[in-house]
Image (cartoon, helix red, strand yellow):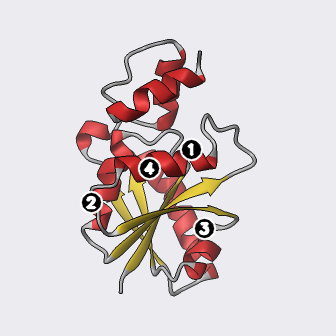
Amino acid sequence: MKRAIYPGSFDPATFGHIDMIERSAQIVDELVVAVLINSAKNPLFSVQERVSMLEEITGHIPNIRITSFNGLLIDYAREADASIIVRGLRAVTDFEYELQIAQTNRIVNSRIDTVFLTTSLEYAYLSSTIVKEVASYGGDISHFVPEQLIDRIYAKYS
């Protein structure tokens, strides 16, 4: 079975994330969407909230499961018995950073490969940071995130 991990903070999940999840799930038997627990960041949503929201908005995809992890992704990939890490690329600047991480991971565990998928053009500009910035000023985020997340995002700023 081909199992891949699509890691991220998903704080909050965007239409770009959903696009990557749907496309990744089509090329593997199982996709593990893994929410990073990162104590160095100050997330808008708790890990449990992010996992729950991802489960809600990806329920239509049969071959995925949502989890969370702490520590090095390459270690978690081994624990999850995944042979592929999926990373999305929006721009050339993403590639330089992601390439360094992929090469490092390959040295640490040569049995796990990184696959890069370019984002769909309609989401190439989109990031969780942009969503949070717009939402913090009460701007319209309906073009960025699923409808069922909108009120939860605004509630964090009220």
Residue located beneath label 4 in the image: 54
Query: Is 42 or 60 nearer to us in this picture?
Result: 60
- Mark 2 vs mark 1: which is more N-terminal? 2
Mark 3 residue element: helix
* Up/down of 105 relative to 146, above or below: below
- Mark 3 vs mark 2: which is more N-terminal? 2
Which amino acid, by three-letter code, is at mark 3?
Answer: Leu
Q: Are marks 3 and 2 in contact (CB under 8 Å)?
A: no
Q: How far is disc 4 from disc 2 in space, using C-alphas? A: 15 Å
Query: Is 96 or 67 nearer to us in this picture?
Result: 67
Query: Is 155 or 123 nearer to us in this picture?
Result: 155
User: Crowdedness of circle 3 by 10 Å Cα count: few (<14), some, many (20+)?
Assistant: some
Which amino acid, by three-letter code, is at mark 4?
Answer: Leu
Mark 2 residue element: helix
Q: Is residue 149 visible?
A: yes
- Mark 1 vs mark 3: which is more N-terminal? 1
- Mark 3 vs mark 4: which is more N-terminal? 4
Q: How far is disc 3 from disc 4 in space, using C-alphas? A: 19 Å
Residue located beneath label 3 in the image: 73
Q: How far is disc 1 from disc 4 in space, using C-alphas? A: 9 Å
Disc number placed over residue 139 in the picture, else none? none
Residue 94, horizontal then vertical, whole percent:
46, 49
Residue at figure coordinates x 42%, y 14% from the top left? 139
Residue located beneath label 2 in the image: 23
Disc number placed over residue 49 in the picture, else none? 1
Which quadrant: the C terminus?
A: top right
Which dot, 2 or 1, sits closer to the camera? Answer: 1
* Up/down of 47 relative to 42, above or below: below
Q: How far is disc 2 from disc 1 in space, using C-alphas? A: 23 Å
